[in-house]
Amino acid sequence: MAQYDKSDLERRMAGAVESLKGDLSGLRTGRANVMLLDPVMVTVYGASMPLNQVATVSAPEPRMLSVQVWDKTNVGPVDKAIRSAGLGLNPITDGQTLRLPIPDLTEDRRKELAKLASKYAEGARIAVRNVRRDGMDNLKADEKKGEISEDERKRLETEVQKLTDSIIADIDAASRRGERKSSASKPGLSFCGHCPHPDLMATQAKSDLTSTAPVHGARHVAIIMDGNGRWAKKRLLPRIAGHRAGVEAVRRVARAARDMGLECLTLYAFSSENWKRPPGEVADLMGLLRHFIQADLDEFHANGVRLRVIGNYRVLDASLVDLIEAAVARTAANSGPVIAIALNYGAQDEMVRAAQQLAQRVARGEMRADEIGVETIGAALDTADLPPLDLLIRTSGEQRLSNFMLWQAAYAELYFTDMLWPDFGAAELGRALAAFRLRDRRFGGL
């Protein structure tokens, strides 16, 4: 079997580019942005891990970041990691909370940001060249085994080099944009555009990339967020630590989805079967949901995001229901992407409720039974006003739908990754969308 796989090379190179853009998008020229700390790696529990896997990062003020460390024994390592990250930030420690004032945008600060952007870009170039090396090695191995001829190897090597040159050119362009914007006088500008690599997912021909339609073609992506417990177990942490890290992943992916041009992101937060879990864990999950809404609603609203909830959420605690409905109402008039949270959701229950609704309409004489079809059933589902589902992602290596969006997934593409949900971010979402673009969607036709 041939070792060379062009699609795999494209996905890996796209992942390097998306990781770079995630890093660059965190660099701001004057305002607090939680993504600024995404590159920070903390050495705890005998391993190096991202800051957002040991603490909650927020921006309570325009010029202040806050880091709430979950385990008090990790405060020192977190402080050290931030100071040594080259971001020019000096934490002020208050118990388990580290406050990070954003420095004034001086000329020296602009130079620091430009150097950091250049450092990130060089890391991406190295990653892409490593992928190229793997591709070249695989081609040589295939020739040696007789899978391809010498001429075919040379032709494919030229193809790999052209792909590498194209992607590195995109990295260079992103780096130049970062350096230019680091010299700009306006605060709040991010260093990179909002589209993935032109050859794989989007084009960056315009300077205002937020108006460019994404070439990956996906409008609606749904994610089964699996693996929080296993993530915590691997680190000898309580399950709640995994769920907290999972909330940080939600924040990362929600921002990345907006930047990648998705119209809708649906997240499987709590299934109708999750009530079988220990009461203490259920209470912790509901507490995290409450905190997430309270902490992140302002950011969602400021970015034009519309919050939606699907599932039978009204059976939850009355105060939580009020909080959810107030958040939905506050963002209802926004014109940006939709973040749909599947809460106390089960696809079978959703279809039962839709069938009951249609049966009641027939009983009232509002419609005939023979008028019920695919469109009328779809219109009775919780997702009736959302775009058709294009891509369904499941993390943690499991390959089943677990009663999630069964009707909507009829012709959706499926993407399974071994990555545990707390480790998921912009790079892996970029890889999933790159894979989606390569799929041949026939919808039952030829």
Image: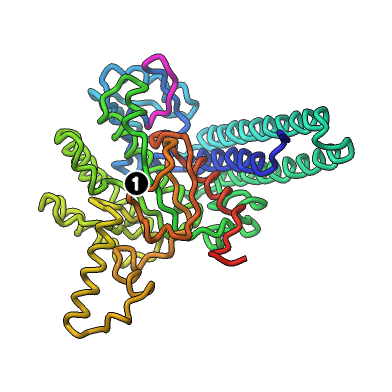
**Residue occupied by mark 1:** 402
- Left or right of 414: which side holds 276? left
What's the residue at 31%, 30% (across, down)? 229
Please indicate whether residue 423 sits to the left or right of residue 440 in the image: left
| Point 51% across, 58% down: residue | 218
Where's residue 118, x and y in %?
A: 61, 34
Q: Is residue 379 above or below residue 259?
A: below
Residue 82 sits in which quadrant?
A: top left
Q: Is residue 13 magenta?
A: no
Which residue is at the far front?
A: 370
Residue 43, placed above or below residue 412: above
Magenta stretch in the rendered image? 45-52
- Residue 46 in the magenta stretch? The answer is yes
Q: Position of residue 267 (x, y in %)?
A: 35, 49
| Residue 416 position (above or below residue 186) | above
| In-image side of 43 versus 286 (left or right) | right
Out of 176 and 165, give the one closest to the viewer.
165
Residue at image position (37%, 54%) is 266
Q: Residue furthest top?
A: 46
